[in-house]
Image (cartoon, rainbow, N blue to C red):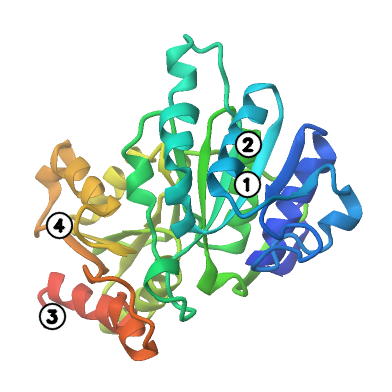
Amino acid sequence: MSDKTKLMNVKEAIIAAMSEEMRRDENVFLMGEDVGIFGGDFGTSVGMLEEFGPERIRDTPISESAISGTAIGAAMTGLRPIVDVTFMDFIVYMMDNIVNQAAKTRYMFGGKGQVPVTFRCAAGSGVGSAAQHSQSLESWFCHIPGLKVVAPGTPADVKGLLKASIRDNNPVIFLEYKAQYNMKGEVPLDPDFIIPLGKGEIKKEGSDITIVTYGRMLERVMKAAEEVEKDGISVEVVDPRTLIPLDKELILNSVKKTGRVILVNDAHKTNGFIGEISAMISESDAFDFLDSPIVRLAAEDVPVPYNHTLETALLPNVEKIKNTIYKVMNKQ
């Protein structure tokens, strides 16, 4: 595998991942509202219509139910659709097709039926899109057996995990954080660069406390971890990258190592996915290694406000994360 990289933003990493997979496999195609001439609502398919043509870059009517039903049917017949859901909030109109058809087909037909479809969802707040266009709904889908859920936090992870999602034979919910579409990072150029689903990563080694986070919050957690080092606190940052399947061993080994854990995400706190991670730790032998209670840090349990000040206040920021670290370490 080549080790060459290029500085890309998240949008460019998404386009690179989809384009490489479409060149590799003629069964892969992209569908959704405005993915063709317009290049995607967030610019995540710019230039693809010119390379692959309208048969494989398919603009659709504004009907999420029709889009999801068509994609799932196409996947059942051997194609590999990528659906640009645009705002993740719109996936509520696709829920019946995804939950009752795509997720259950493999089980109901004894493993003979496969539904290799990837739903790309622009999630999260931070761009002034208000209550109906700013949600992170990953926990809904993590609850449904048969679905895989992916939440990358760097451009390189976006590319490697999106390629793995497209190649997977199961329906995948793929979160893209719209506030980070322009976030830049080095991205491998090798077309064989793949990050397996279910494989997390230690983003920063540490010895005093573990922070498990994913998606949009990873960038803030990394900054907070660096800033508390001046106070002699060594933070280990664990990024599962894939929520279902979850790299449990990676998380539990880190908790056993440090004896303290904070869980951070941008979704609402009540019934959020980090609550599941907390339960998993509590039910494991890692619980016996804890020197302090497990702490969750998440978005407030209110709809996302349009007002920028209120929208900003909703989420864990670097200061909130640092204060939580100090509290757990008994330094505040």
Query: Gap between marks 4 and 2, in whole Å?
Result: 41 Å
- Please tell me whether residue 262 is drawn above or below residue 24 in the rendered image: below
Report which quarter residue 26 is drawn in.
top right
Judging by the rendered image, the residue that carries numbered circle 3 is 331
Query: Which marked residue is nearer to the observer: mark 3 or mark 1?
Result: 1
Mark 1: secondary structure = strand
Give the residue type at disc 4. Answer: Ile
Contact (CB < 8 A) between labels 4 and 1?
A: no
Give the foreground label among 4 and 2. Answer: 2
Whichever of labels 3 and 1 marks the residue nearer the N terminus, that label is 1
On the image, the x and y values in percent for residue 207 come to: 28, 61
Q: Secondary structure at mark 4?
A: loop
Q: Is residue 173 left or right of residue 35?
A: left
Quick one: which residue is furthest to the bottom in this view? Answer: 309
User: Based on the displayed image, in which of its 4 quarters is residue 25 positioned?
Assistant: top right
Sequence-wise first label, 4 or 3 = 4
Q: Is residue 250 above or below residue 266?
A: above
Disc 2 target residue: 71
- Mark 2 near mark 3, Cβ–Cβ under 8 Å? no
Which numbered marker is on residue 294? 4
Q: Position of residue 187 (x, y in %)?
A: 69, 61
SS of the residue at dot 3? Answer: loop
Residue type at mark 2 is Ala
